[in-house]
Image (spheres, rainbow, N blue to C red):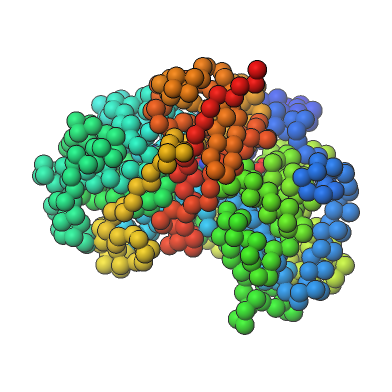
Amino acid sequence: MEKEFENVCFGNCYGTCRMKTSVQDGHIVNIAGDPHAPFTKGVLCVKGYSFPHLYSSPERLLYPLKQHSKGSGKWERISWEQALTEIAHKLINIKNEEHNLLSVCLDKYPGSVRVLNQTVEAFFRSIGFVTFMNGSPCNSAGLDASILSYGSCKKPSPFDMANANLTIVWGGNPAWTLPHQMKYIYESRKRGGLLVVIDPYLTATAARADLYVQIKPGTDGLLALGMGRILFDEHLLDENFLHNHTSGWENFRSCLQEVDLKTVSELTGVSIDDLFNLAILYGQIKPATIWLGIGAQNHLTGGQNYRAIHALAAMTGNIGIPGGNVHYTTTEIIKQFDTFNNIEPPADSVGYNITGGHRKISTGRFSHFVNLSPPLRFLWISERNPVAQDPDSSNVKDVLKSIETVIVADTTLTTTAQYADYVLPVATFLEQEEVVISKWHYAVALNEQTLPPPGECRSDFEIMRDLALKLNTLAPGFSTFPTSRTADDWIDLALREKIYALLGIHHYRDLLGKYFALDIPPVPWNDFRFATASGKYEFETTHPVGINASSLPIPTKISQPSSAYPIQLISVRSSMMLNSQFGQLIKIIDPAENCVLLNPLLAKEKNITEGDEVCIYNSIGQIFLPAALTHSVPQDIVIVNVNSEVNKHHELNSLISLQETDLGAHSCEVPGMAFKNCYINLYRNRTE
Ligand SMILES: Nc1nc2c(c(=O)[nH]1)N[C@H]1C(S)=C(S)[C@@H](COP(=O)(O)OP(=O)(O)OC[C@H]3O[C@@H](n4cnc5c(=O)[nH]c(N)nc54)[C@H](O)[C@@H]3O)O[C@H]1N2
Ligand SMILES: Nc1nc2c(c(=O)[nH]1)N[C@H]1C(S)=C(S)[C@@H](COP(=O)(O)OP(=O)(O)OC[C@H]3O[C@@H](n4cnc5c(=O)[nH]c(N)nc54)[C@H](O)[C@@H]3O)O[C@H]1N2
Ligand SMILES: [Mo]
């Protein structure tokens, strides 16, 4: 008998796709997009359709593993009983020796907004004061740009993009990273709307644009200032909006009057003609919307660049109107439910300083972790792959090796898991009940358990609960985690206070078969009351922006290549992967995706032909990839996909040093990371 289930993908992406999954005799016989899902409308991405394969993939971890010496590859299958007992003893020993647990650390970044999964953080709070990694490896510089401009990072409904008469996709590639959004862009185009793409690389989205602007990486703020100057000179400003709803305009205007368009053109690589075309299109076509991707803010001045782009929307009055605004991610959703922050530590917990409290360290800064006092002795990694995704992979490995106990909870033996002492096999979304809230289109949906976890896999929640039980057996009172609470109880508790009332439901299972979404206004700021100190859109901020940054939306530096490493490496997302995940798909569908893209002129200069193995190197690392020649990439840039688990021994991020973005601390307490600011050189690897 075939049975159908409702699922929601909880990958770290914007889609949060609803699916219908048919199961027969314990096997998935069909997986398809839910045709009634308002945003995704029945379509999945290639990864979504591959989930049945993932469930039974030979790479899937099925049992707890213990490694004898990190990185040695000498794995032993152990029982959960052994894994939990040994891990519990490590925690108990640390507390006995140090009288606090600050050397215990959690590294977790789900990306998607999941409810039950918050129990992982809850577990760590339940054992005492520990160390949490905070900050985001993703979008924080851009979030700060929103906060400094509007006071908070509200975003328009993605459906509203269909109402735009001009859409500028700036530093994003939705055709690959959020294919569902393309149909709203196409709706606008069907009505005669135009699509402009600004990107150093002629992406799949750019290929569909009416105007493609090839910009030099990291110079977006300058381009925006150039456009601002033209808008001013050509009298394309919304004086009413500027006068009534903004502050700091006079100072910003004075700076715009100083902008030299020739210099802008030289530094951005955008011709004067294109600069004028772009500014005039944006100034004349109403309403005009801008989609800010994540790509253009992972640069040294990414935050200021994004502020300068928002300023264009304010100058033209494209804020608070349907079809206008700037689309960027938001952190607002997490505030809508209880994230179990009230789990109290045990009474005997001793904090690091007199006032107690958890220690916070900045995500991704592994090189800083070696100097911590007290040092890190126990690291739990969940929903993260730091060796693949954080800066300077070689250093991340060294630091992992230096930590006494590293535990990775994951579905496969990732590059990070290879530097773990214990690897715990987790259940995927198909194997557990969960409520997921979309951070892009705000849908609140129930994901049903569809299959039993394979082998001995357990959900993250079960692992934490079982560890709490084990700890309390070995050392009574060690954890205050309410171990008798079921998964249902936790989800119910999280949603009971706010979400039930907001959606008019009585229990989270009422979500099944329904299409609820949080009622967030589709057009933010339509009352023109901004959340800033002045209550206005702020060109000039009174918030601290860092020593070298301006209170106005003006980037103050541009990174330059050196003669040793004259080529910029930009890492982009693959349509077939989700960050480091789904590398198997590339192997099966298109191995050519796993290569370095080079301009034929650069290839000629380096004596490289299609398919040659290329060594890409800089002062911190080297990787080898086959060459693919394309005119989509300029001569001084190469494009590589964000790390692929296919390339286990050639980690892209071994070339990417730790550099911070200018902003990020307002939204995420620490600045972002400038992953795209990477310079390299390359040669054809002669193997003959
Ligand atoms: N298929 C797929 N979808 C995903 C993901 C995935 O890995 N695969 N990851 C998810 C995650 S975590 C994220 S954060 C989002 C990211 O989503 P996007 O922002 O769409 O993705 P990226 O490929 O990182 O960057 C987008 C573009 O920015 C361009 N870019 C780089 N530097 C600059 C610059 O200085 N200026 C300009 N104008 N453009 C620049 C790159 O060339 C690239 O084409 O996607 C999510 N969705
Ligand atoms: N070079 C370069 N580096 C980058 C970027 C870039 O553009 N260029 N982009 C940055 C960005 S935007 C981001 S968001 C980060 C992403 O960095 P990460 O979040 O570290 O990347 P993912 O590959 O998504 O890793 C998530 C891991 O969690 C596992 N996982 C999935 N579901 C679950 C679950 O339910 N439980 C548990 N325990 N594990 C699970 C997956 O199998 C995977 O191994 O990378 C950043 N790094
Ligand atoms: Mo991200």
Q: Is residue 99 above or below residue 511?
A: below
Q: Is residue 34 above or below residue 320?
A: above
Q: Residue 394: image x %, image y %?
A: 64, 46
Left or right: 271 as drawn, with respect to 477: left
Residue at position x 73%, y 58% in the image:
403
Quadrant of the rendered structure where residue 174 is?
Answer: top left
Quadrant of the rendered structure where residue 197 is?
Answer: top left
Q: Is residue 242 above or below residue 590?
A: below
Residue at position x 40%, y 31% in the image:
636
Left or right: 177 as drawn, with respect to 223: right
Q: Is residue 565 above or below residue 523?
A: above
Inspect this view and state whether residue 328 appears: no
Quadrant where the C terminus is found in the figure: top right
Q: Farthest residue toward the bottom? A: 354
Q: Nearer the viewer, residue 509 or 602?
A: 602
Q: Nearer the viewer, residue 675 or 145?
A: 675
Residue at position x 28%, y 54% in the image:
554
Quadrant where the N terminus is found in the figure: top right
